[in-house]
Image (cartoon, rainbow, N blue to C red):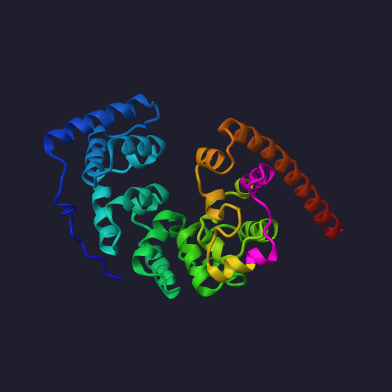
Amino acid sequence: MQITDFRCRLYAKQVPQPDLEVQTDDIWTELRKSNRLPMVDVQSCREIIKLLLSFHYHKNHIVRELSENTTLLKFPVSRWKETVPVLQSYGFHEAQFLPLLIGCHSLLHGTVWNNLQEILTFLHSLHIPLQKRLQVITRNPLLLSTDDTMPLQRNYGNLLKVFTKNEAQSLVVKNPNLFTDPVKETNKKINYVYNEMGIRPQEIVRSRVFEHPLIHIVTRHQFAARAGVYKYPNKNEIASKELKLRTNVGDNPSLTDLVDTSTATFAYSFCGIGVLEYKAFAAMMMEELGEESDYESETDSDFSDSDSE
């Protein structure tokens, strides 16, 4: 694909120059205080900060992200100014630039444009609209690490064993990590939500349950169950949810309420219990499930040893 090469006519609405210098000084001062900075070109770093400010990122956001991803500052500002227009030519907008560059440094090397085109073509084949394709890649830049879409197709095919095409499409848009997570891990989550919580595909699709580790899902569910606010639904309740396309049939909170909310919202709003009590329970569950995982690993190892003999 031929990429249009237009140089930084990035955005007409720029930060006023005096304010830009002041904010750049403030951000650079904060970054230096972090004591995490590698050996970098100061002037280039300042130009990178100005570029990010021109995309209307808040200065606190810039400080936080650059402090945690200092490798980005090792790239000269010229690489940034070459990369951003290409991202724009694909349709990515300013809010997506920094997450993409943080998640895939190779964009600044200029070595993954073919991969990007392959992934966009693959997502198009799933009938995912353009803006949603860009969202999927922004939220899971790991997709750009390969030009082989076969593993992604296998992961998507695994979803089709349980979900309809429309449901699977919605799921990967809401949970782009499904393309790159191990199938075994995904299936454990599906089995737990389906069998242990009694939740069916239509409600699963509305949530971002697959973005969370299994232990988070189990802990939230077990805590809600022991607090008496979640009960395994009976057959009539399950059928009612499927027919009415509702997630609030009965007294149970929805899957989204259970797993996608903050700790404070979950503890106070749905369980009426303090955050500290929930955190203590979560620590206990972490230890308990960790022991179960160790046991399963040892068991798997035993089977592997016996099979090899």
Q: x and y percent of residue 111 in the render?
A: 37, 57
Q: Magenta includes 219?
A: yes
**Foreground: 298 or 113?**
298
Q: Magenta includes 292?
A: no
Residue at 27% in and 34% down: 41
Residue at 35% in and 38% down: 66
**Foreground: 279 or 302?**
279
Quarter of the image where one finds residue 70:
top left
Q: x and y percent of residue 134 in the render?
A: 36, 61
Secondary structure of the magenta portion, mostly? Answer: helix
Q: x and y percent of residue 252 in the render?
A: 60, 53
Quarter of the image where one finds residue 59:
top left
**Residue 16 position (above or below residue 230):** above
Q: Is residue 42 left or right of residue 270?
A: left
Look at the image and give the residue range highlighted in magenta. Answer: 218-238
Q: Is residue 40 left or right of residue 265?
A: left
Residue at 56% in and 33% down: 275
Q: Quadrant of the N terminus?
A: bottom left
Q: Quadrant of the C terminus?
A: bottom right
Q: Is residue 55 left or right of residue 305?
A: left
Residue at 43% in and 59% down: 144
**Foreground: 304 or 169?**
169
